Image: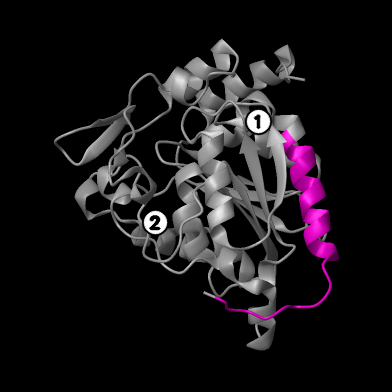
Amino acid sequence: MRYIVSSRALSLFLVVLACTSFHAVLSAPVHNGKPVIAVIPAAWHSPIHYQLYTTALRSAGYASVSERLPSCDSPDPKSQTVATDAAFIRERLLLPAINRGREIVVIMHSYSGGPGSMAAKGLSVAERRAAGQPGGIVGLIFLSAFVAHDGQTLVSGSGGQLSPWVNQKPNGQMGVINPKEVFYNDVPDAVANQAIGNLRDQATSTAFTPCGPPAWADTYYNGRRAYAHTTLDNAIPIVAQDAMLEGSGVQWDTQTFNTGHCPFLSQPNQLSVWTDRQITKFKAVKGSGQIAVA
């Protein structure tokens, strides 16, 4: 059943859109033993796009952290790569909480599956414990996200070409043609219009620079990696999502949402409930597992 955003939630969302910084959103309830959730935005997107979802997560007792990636709305787009985004994610979103002894679940949407998986490499709870360090990552969740292997670019699966809905610009940036249809085809119009207004150009180079070794390939994440399929997705079609998981060579816990590319806007409560359930499963996995397989 398709989730309808309530008028109260919609009103709150529109107020937050008007008042919140576009750069960083931090939601921090009192420490209750639950992992911190790092929400890594997609290309073109910012933390504000995930506000309905992170608000629902906060209601479930989770602190969350999110920040716009350097490759989005960059003043120097030609210098941006998947690797520079990965370094930013690691230093700004993961290590601060981990070094304070917190456990983290990394949630990646779309493009950020590439840099997010790179950033998470080597930071599992098992690896941190083996090094005598506190905190660490307890699980990875992909929201219709790229599952990239070491050395792959994000256009590897499309013959090295950008999607036809991408508007490549001469200044090293790329925009989106008809974002309502591509990203928000099932999102209520008022929310979709605000989301479209908050999109920013993405550095074209991030589609063509290679990804590094991904954390998802490590055996520690057996039972600790999950993927949200989106059946109405016009950005990463369901057949492409299926092909990436099949080609990964590892097992995933999957859930199918009858949504477009952004279930955090059209079904935020359902997505939050599933996220909470997945985190409970991650925490229940026994043993530290072996670390590196990639």
User: How far across and how far down the image is residue 50, in percent?
Assistant: 58, 35
User: How far across and how far down the image is residue 159, in percent?
Assistant: 30, 45
Left or right, residue 35 beside residue 131: right
User: How far across and how far down the image is residue 173, in percent?
Assistant: 24, 38
From this viewpoint, is residue 234 visible?
yes
Residue 52: image tag: 1
Q: Please tell me which residue is depicted at 66% across the width and 39% down the height of the picture.
A: 54
Tell me the kind of residue under disc 2.
Asp
Q: Which residue is mark 2?
A: 85
Element class at badge 1:
helix
Q: Please tell me which residue is depicted at 67% across the width and 35% down the height of the picture.
A: 53
Front one among 20 and 277: 277
Left or right, residue 108 beside residue 170: right
Front one among 209 and 137: 209
Element class at badge 2:
helix
Looking at the magenta stretch, what is its main secondary structure?
helix
Residue 272 higher or lower than 292, as above or below: above
Tell me the quarter of the image containing the N terminus: top right
Neighbour class for label 1 at 10 Å: few (<14), some, many (≥20)? many
Q: In which image quadrant can residue 133 be found?
A: bottom right
- Span shown in magenta: 271-293
Residue 193 higher or lower than 19, as above or below: above
